[in-house]
Image (tube, rainbow, N blue to C red):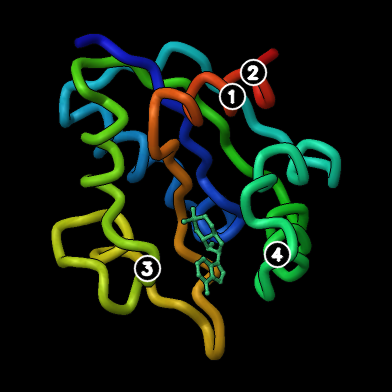
Amino acid sequence: TTERTLILIKPDGVERNLTGEILSRIERKGYTIVELAMTTPDREVLAAHYEEHQGKPFYEPLLEFMSSGPVVAAIVKGDRVIEGIRSLAGTTDPTVAAPGTIRGDLGRDWPGTVQKNLIHASDSTLSADREIEIWFG
Ligand code: CMP
């Protein structure tokens, strides 16, 4: 099934000049970037995006981090792309994410939190539709 998903290159990825590397991995896998934008998101966008995490202990630091600099937002299209990009990204904690994944190869977290993990990718068709609407309207 052809799907669309939303990815974000988080501020740590942009700051470390990994935008090209991350987008390249996505393209080399065979997925197509159909929309691309760079923006420093405001609180409102991030609150909508991270709705499900509201109230969690990492919520405020997460919003702080995500609004700390530019992010790259993209809509990516392909067969089973939602599952595929989650797999390319690797698990949340970059320290233990499998080698071969974006987080596993390129990420390590700075002391104390699991936050600077380079990329966000929608986890379901429902979130993909919702997040695409938030970032691209
Ligand atoms: P992601 O899975 O893309 O979406 C939630 C984000 O919250 C996660 O990446 C991390 O960047 C951040 N985060 C910070 N602390 C935690 C934690 N303890 N568990 C899960 N996510 C966390």
| Quadrant assignment for the N terminus | top left
Callout in the foreground (3, 4): 4
Looking at marks 3 and 1 on the same chain, the residue that comes earlier in the sequence is marked by: 3
Distance of mark 1 from mark 4, alpha carbons?
19 Å
Query: Which three-letter amino acid code belongs to the residue tagged 4?
Result: Tyr
Queried on whether the Cβ of the residue with tag 4 lies below 8 angstroms from ligand 1, the answer reads no
Residue at the disc numbered 1: 130
Callout in the foreground (3, 1): 1
Q: Secondary structure at mark 3?
A: loop
Image coords of residue 68 (percent x, y): 76, 58
Callout in the foreground (3, 2): 2
Instruction: Say whether marks 4 and 2 touch (CB < 8 Å).
Output: no
Instruction: Say whether marks 1 and 2 touch (CB < 8 Å).
Output: yes
In the image, is residue 40 above or below residue 93?
above
Front residue (pair 28, 50):
50
Q: Residue at x 46, y 78 (%)?
A: 109
* Image quadrant in which you'd find residue 66: bottom right
Query: Which three-letter amino acid code belongs to the residue tagged 2?
Result: Glu
Distance of mark 3 from mark 2, alpha carbons?
28 Å
Residue at the disc numbered 4: 59
Residue at the disc numbered 2: 133
In the image, is residue 19 above or below residue 17?
above
Query: Which three-letter amino acid code belongs to the residue tagged 1?
Result: Arg
* Image quadrant in which you'd find residue 107: bottom left
